[in-house]
Amino acid sequence: RDFRITGQVVFWLRPFIHNAPGTGGVSMCFLNAPEIDFRISGAGEIANYLPGLKPMIVSACSSALAERLVMPNQVTQLMGFEDFKLYPMVFQSPVPVAVLEVTVVKVRVEHAAAVVEQKD
């Protein structure tokens, strides 16, 4: 209950298919291990109140998620566009060619009036 994942995610629309809509599936991975949090409900709700038990459960879930979905590991969901059938998800660990992370330090915004004047 109240499950939350926080992290940077990368999505690839692939493979490209020349027929509409142009892609046959989507792949995704996290750049770094995401932070997860959730509230345990039902019979296991007592774990929310026992010291140390919930952090141990969250840590085990975080490790399992990181092993499967943090770069270079990824999951791919393919779809047939003839029948819109979803195929089984594929977990894979391809060797990355390169990784480039860009951080925007400063953005300069021009006023719309100045842009209009330059076009004339």
Image: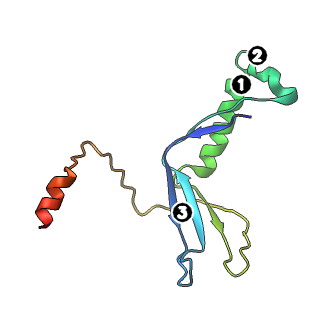
Q: Which numbered disc covers residue 50? A: 2
Mark 2, residues whose alpha carbon is within 10 Å: few (<14), some, or many (≥20)? few
Residue 69: image location, x then y, percent: 59, 51
Q: Earlier in the sequence, mark 1 or mark 3?
A: 1
Q: Is residue 22 left or right of residue 77?
A: left
Element type where label 2 sits in the image: loop
Residue type, mark 2 in image: Leu
Crowding near the residue tagged with mark 1, few <14, some 14–19, many ≥20 C-alpha atoms within 10 Å: some
Q: Quadrant of residue 36?
A: top right
Identify which residue is drawn at 54% across, 63% down: 94
> Where the C terminus falls, by quadrant?
bottom left
Q: Is residue 101 left or right of residue 34?
A: left
Amino acid, disc 3: Pro
Mark linked to residue 94: 3
**Residue highlighted by disc 1:** 54
Q: Secondary structure at mark 1?
A: helix
* Vertical order, 104 against 44 (above or below): below
Q: Are marks 1 and 2 in contact (CB under 8 Å)?
A: yes
As rendered, which of 40 and 65 lies closer to the eye?
Answer: 40
Residue at (70% x, 19% y) in the render: 52
- Of callouts 2 and 3, which one flags the residue occurring earlier in the amino acid sequence? 2
Q: Which quadrant: the N terminus?
A: top right
Q: Residue at x 72, y 69 (%)?
A: 86
Could you say whether the residue bearing mark 3 is in a helix, strand or loop?
A: loop
* Of labels 2 and 3, the one closer to you: 2
- Of residues 89 and 45, the one drawn nearer to the viewer in this rendering: 45
Labels 1 and 3 touching (C-beta < 8 A): no
Q: Residue at x 81, y 24 (%)?
A: 45
The one nearer the camera, 63 or 35, is 35
Distance from Cα at disc 2 to Cα at disc 3: 40 Å
